[in-house]
Image (cartoon, rainbow, N blue to C red):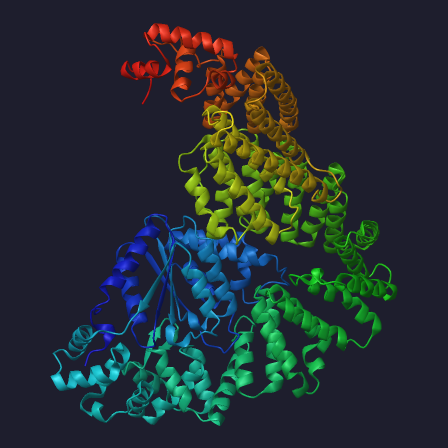
Amino acid sequence: MRRSTTIPLVSRQEQVASLLLAVGRASAGRPGLVLVGGDAGVGKTRLIGHVAQAAEQAGASAVVVHCVDLGQVGIPYLPFTEALTQLQAGAAGPDAAARVTELVAERPALWRLLEPGGGGDADHDERLQLFEGIARSLAVAGAPERPLVLVVEDAHWADASTRDVLRFLAARARSENVLLVVTYRADDVDRRHPLRPLLAELSRLEHVERIDLQPFTEDELREFTTALAGRPLPAAGFADVLDRSEGNAFFAEELLDAGPDSASLPWTLTEVLRTRLERLDPEVQQVLRIASVAGRRVNEELLRAAAARWGAHDVDAALREAVTQQVLVVSGAHLEFRHALLAEALYADLLPGERSSVHRAYLAVIEQDGPDGMKIGSAAERAHHAYEGHDLPAALSASCDAALRARRLLAPEEELRHWEQVLALWESVPGAEERIGRDRVDVAVAAGEAAARAGDPMRAVKLTQRAVDGADDPVRRAGLRHVLVHRYLDLPTWDEVPGQVEAAIDDLRAALQMLPERSPERIWTNALLARVTMIIDLDDDARGHAQCAIEEARSVGQPGALAAALSTLAVLDVADPDRAATLLDEARTAATEAGDVLTEMRTLYNATANRFYAGELEAAQQRVEHALARAEELGLAWSTPTVNLRILQEVMLYFRGDLSPRKAGGVPATHKHVLEATQMYAAVARGDADVIPRGEALFDHWQSDGQIALIGGGSLVDALTWAGRYDDAAALAVRITDHLGEVWTEVFLGRIWLSALAIAALADAAEADRSAGRVGAPGSAAANAVEARAAARIDSGDSLLAIARETAQRGRPRGGVLGPEGRAWLQRAAAENARLHAVVGSTGSASAGADSRARAAGDLWGAAAACWQETVNAFGFGYRYEVARSRYRWAEALLGAGERQAAEVEAAEALSEAEDMGAQPLADAVRALARRARLDLPGVRRATASTLTEREEEVLGLVAQGLSNRQIGERLFISTKTVSVHVSNLLAKLGASGRAEAVSLAHQRGLLEV
């Protein structure tokens, strides 16, 4: 009988086509990830092997790497270490090998994976650099004509760090020529399996495809068994295979291999495999059992040495027979079980004593030094074999070594597991402290640090508390207090629990009394006290502690603590932007010296934001360019501070009038939506036709990031207002405010901007009512409804302005100084509300006389004009678009106040700026104002072949809308008497006896659009 590996792939055409399409997309610069799941034996490896071969025939490079089963911990990043090794060895061709080798040489974080010693102590801020390095290595290995297909087999055995890298690669996929294929055993991934949440998370990403490989159908199984047997099976034989295998390819193959005796075989696959293995020679079985202890895949030399140490004879012959019988297959320097189920069946057959003995045999081999002077096996492998072999002293030492190795590899979850293993073994190993060179308190502190880096803050608190409680020396215990409080600060809501912060402050102050002057622990305690006292607004205390930490850190050379204290002092001195900027620059220098790259990036962002919020856009622009260049240099192109810098860069371009659309290519999925929201600013100003659907598409992402709700939602409010959907705009502003009030704080400063936009929508709605003549006869129901709407809008506008002013007072930043942008939006809110009052006041009461209404309207528009003049000045710090928009409103108000010449000057400037920026809605609005008011602006006047003048045509259009002479006058900024003259003239020219006939004749002659 032939084996499945020797026959063409049966069925699976749909899955093959889907995977090859993904390869094609990767070749075109559209990276992807395919998750291939299925039960054990269903044919995942066979499918992937076929696709890899087909992809290579089409010009792609296929690299297959593996996860291994080493219990709950595993070897950090093993499949990616294997991938980099293969790529450097030329698995994707010599050009790719050269590119990867060059990149590795430039990225110290990658050395940790590839160098046997793994480098020195790691700063865990490098972890993002490591992930970026892995991603970049895979990216440079692929090319448009030769994409890289990386297959990660058996992800159900993946270690925590490997899962983190998979998450990172999926989220950061941009335009690389890379396809990632991940296989896993679906029947192993139950609801508690650590891979399960990752699969759910990845499946939600747009570029991730999921293939669930099902057992063969009856027809597919018949084709498969026919190919294996070389002929169709007899009906009874096929029915037996179908009934027993249930379409599982591996089970069916083993049943066929059993031949005529298959009817007497047990019904479970494990028992079938055991029966098959029992037919092999005892020597072969013995060597296979030894191999099974190493897992599915084992280095051949390691297996030979372990087998010899355990007492196996004629290992060469046994291995040759195992390969001949296709129980083992050769894979480079390794031997693999043809299926993991074979290894599992053999391992399960070992007696407990046999298992321990074989594990100790492996341990004895891998503890030996290799040619390079390093241990043959990794520390994690030694810890695994020692623990399973019940050699507890060796397990303790190896677990400690594995924890330190995991730390150097930037694998915090694995590090935590190994430290916890050390703590669990401590009481069982006499002389544990002497054996590993550290006491239990040190181990608990290290475990707490690992838990914090692994994102488990509650575990970090418990482990650090264990260290504090275990410290017998009062001074040592005092020195650990700042570590414990730091861990508490990582808890999401710890500082919101009444009394918690105050208790922590008391503990830290008590610790200060015991700590030696200028000791690192004292410096860090002061730095942390500065931060914690600032949380509860004890600014003077915070300043004192920060200055003390700064002075001592400078004197003894503690750059990490110095950076932390300087950053806190910069926040305290935010009212003095220049001093805060100086402090942040020094903090950045200290962070760089300490090797704390994420703190360095945070200070770069804070320093840039400092200049931006001070209104110094030129300086901010220079800083953001420098900061982004530094981020690229550090391999932190998409860290959180870097993303904030990119947002700030986009906002600054918009502020300065650069509304040109910028492609969002290369943005990782994790940050795609917040950057799309930021680009909404310019899209609304340009008047993009799809801007409203784009804004609405961001609704689903509000919960993931409040910035998306604020920026994307606020920009959508503006877009809806430009589109004439005033009620929708005002309602959306309220919805955003309510949402962010829940997730942030009730007085978030963006509320000022939202209030101004909402008042603008109300004022435009009132203007639309006035322009459309929706007034009605005095005393009529229609007139009463219009007056009620106007009164409601006035109340809403006044309320929103009051909210904006309250927010400016209560929500102002630390230092009490609202920045130039905040002050400008507060002024615009006041100006929009003045416009609202002027629009509603211009309509006036039906009982008031014409002269009285005109005087009142003039006063209201005069007040609005003064407000808009202040608004133009307020935005003058560099917010070019809002200056132009405010000039337009200023011109409108000046017209209402009767100052035509001044209005023409401001309108001309607004139009020129709008056209230069490409702000189409604003330019159209200024032109419409100019036409109504007959302002002499470039490109506004138009020739006409009609017997009517331009002004008479405008009056005729408003007559057709049903407006009265008074309403037409208000709309065109002319007197009621002048309107009457224009109406009389157009009636005469058209030969009409009245307004209705004039409209009808105008339609007939094509003078009015239907």
Vertical side of 722 occupied by 312: above or below: below
> Which residue appears farthest toward the front when viewing the image?
779
Instruction: Pick whichever, 505 or 266, lies toward us.
Output: 505
Instruction: Pick whichever, 866 or 824, lies toward us.
Output: 866
Q: Say which quadrant the N terminus sits in.
A: bottom left
Vertical side of 166 occupied by 728: above or below: above
Q: Quadrant of residue 656?
A: top right
Instruction: Pick whichever, 307 or 904, lies toward us.
Output: 904
Q: Is residue 426 left or right of residue 13?
A: right
Q: Quadrant of residue 183?
A: bottom left
Q: Say which quadrant the C terminus sits in.
A: top left
- Residue 746 visible to the viewer: yes
Q: How many marks?
A: 0
Instruction: Pick whichever, 831 or 462, lies toward us.
Output: 831
> Measuring 51% from the left and 43% from the top, which residue is drawn there?
732
- Residue 710 visible to the viewer: no
Please state the horizontal and vertical placement of residue 190, each as a whole percent of the image. 43, 75
Please state the horizontal and vertical placement of residue 438, each as a whole percent of the image. 71, 76
Please state the horizontal and vertical placement of residue 185, each as a whole percent of the image. 38, 73
Vertical side of 186 occupied by 87: above or below: above
Q: Is residue 39 left or right of residue 623?
A: left
> Measuring 63% from the left and 79% from the top, which residue is drawn there?
422
Vertical side of 248 occupied by 917: above or below: above
Please state the horizontal and vertical placement of residue 934, each as a whole percent of the image. 48, 12
